[in-house]
Image (cartoon, rainbow, N blue to C red):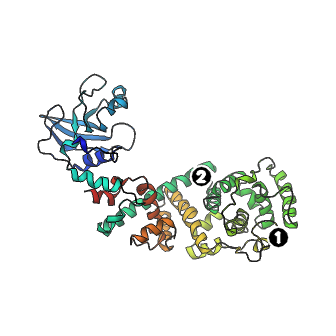
Amino acid sequence: MSNLLSPALTSEDFLYFLWQFRYFRHIGLRTTQGERIRVVHPGFRNPDSGPDFTNARIVLGEVEWVGTVEAHIRASDWLVHRHQYDPAYDNVILHIVWENATLPIRRRDGSVIPTLCLSDYTDPSLLLRYRSLIDGTGLIPCAGRLSQVEPLRRMSMFDKVLFERLARKAAEAEAVYRSSDSDWEETAYRLMAQAFGFQINAEPFAQLTRLVPLKFLLKHRDQPFQMEALLFGTAGLLSGEPTDDYEITLLREYRFLAAKYRLTEKRLPGHLWKWSRLRPANFPTLRLAQFVALLAGRGSFFSLLMETDAPTLLRHLQAAPSAYWQTHYRFGPPSARVSSTLGETAARSLIINAVIPLLIAYSCQKGLPAYRDRAVALLEELPAEQNRITALWSALHVPLASAFDSQAALELYTSYCCPKKCLSCQIGLEMVK
């Protein structure tokens, strides 16, 4: 059966699938050394370093063995990976392979490890179905047969990946919390700033808030002009040759505040900010002005994000910036028409990318599940996002009714479909089985 090996089988995923779900012929099962073998339990997949399965139970001849199992496409990969020198592999009781080698595989002490060549006991149609997924050229490998999968199984996978996504974003938010001296107010400020960068300018926004802590801005919360001066100046967005009176006044105020807070030498280089191929409504200058409008006059910024209902929070996020930015996208001559406030779609994006991770991280850190439930409720309340990836799923008639669904669709696509981890996906598993 080794002739079934193809470029589609370049990782051990298919072997993991066969072994974990026992999708091989058990009658007459023998090791390559000719010894009868019975699988009592395949063990548990090991997500860390070391052998691939732990706590496996097999019977060789008349003796039951308990230990670890290692999988390789080729038996010789044991030597390639130098497992024969690694004590972590001394407890391997079975080596499962797709292509066998005549040379016996041994442990560090020289003892031979029993080898099971699964290609000799596998239905070729399983590999063909696996190949049809992995070798497909579509952006979603299972697109052609997705309609054959029960909706309940698809929904179960969407739920799974959504919570994987939330866990990852919460871990990222918790990392910001740790780097913010365990201050939730500062954490909320940094997360929201990064979200205001809308991916393309997320990094300079993040760097800016690390240079200008929230406590500096709160001292000027009733003076939005001073907040703008401090942020625009530190951001490197005030040029040495101002283009109009407003920029001249901001620059003068910035120099005073930068000296006061010892920020003169901490200014970002202006070239970090991206402008090309952006609509004027996404220019970093206007986004920064909108961010100031959100912060101005606030008491606890953290409480605003954590306790406010979705409609009210959307209104706060769409606060109008100062008068200058209602006629300008950047410094210089005014524009004829300016969309000065955040659109509702952008405001919803801030809730998804800043507020939701903050709620989940706080829930985990404090052991308060009510905040996790609030995060999920917000996702279910917000409409589904509309973008290139969600359009792929909609074209396959997958219903995306809320942001809960669209976030799950994004995660499934990026973490499973793109790397073609079909055998780690309940939908793909169903198609192969």
Disc ID at residue 333: 1
- The residue carrying pointer 2 sits among few (fewer than 14), some (14 to 19) or many (20 or more) residues within 10 Å by Cα, namely many
**Mark closer to the observer (2, 1):** 1
Q: Position of residue 218 (x, y in %)?
A: 74, 61
Q: Secondary structure at mark 1?
A: loop
Quarter that holds the N terminus: top left
| Between 8 and 65, the one nearer to me in the picture | 8
Q: Position of residue 207 (x, y in %)?
A: 68, 52
Question: Which quadrant, please, contains the C terminus?
Answer: bottom left
- What is the secondary structure assignment of the residue under circle 2? helix
Seen at 70% across and 75% down, the residue is: 339
The answer to whether residue 266 is seen in the rendering is yes
Asked whether, in this view, residue 243 is left or right of residue 345, the answer is: right
Q: Nearer the viewer, residue 334 or 425?
A: 334
Q: Is residue 404 visible?
A: no
Q: Is residue 154 left or right of residue 189?
A: left
In three-dimensional space, the C-alpha distance between marks 2 and 1, rounded to whole angstroms, equals 38 Å
Q: Amino acid at mark 2?
A: Val
Residue plotted at (38% across, 52% down): 421
Mark 2 or 1 closer to N-term?
A: 2
Does residue 43 sit above or below 77 in this rendering?
A: below
The residue positioned farthest toward the top in the image shown: 110
| Residue 400 locus on image (x, y percent) | 43, 72
Query: Is residue 71 rendered to the left or right of residue 33?
Result: right
Classed neighbour count for the residue bearing mark 1: other residues with Cα under 10 Å, few (<14), some (14–19), many (≥20):
few
Image check: 328 left or right of 319? right
Query: Where 361 falls versus 63 (above or below)?
Result: below
Q: Quadrant of residue 226?
A: bottom right
Q: Which residue is mark 2?
A: 176
Give percent across and percent down for residue 301: 65, 64
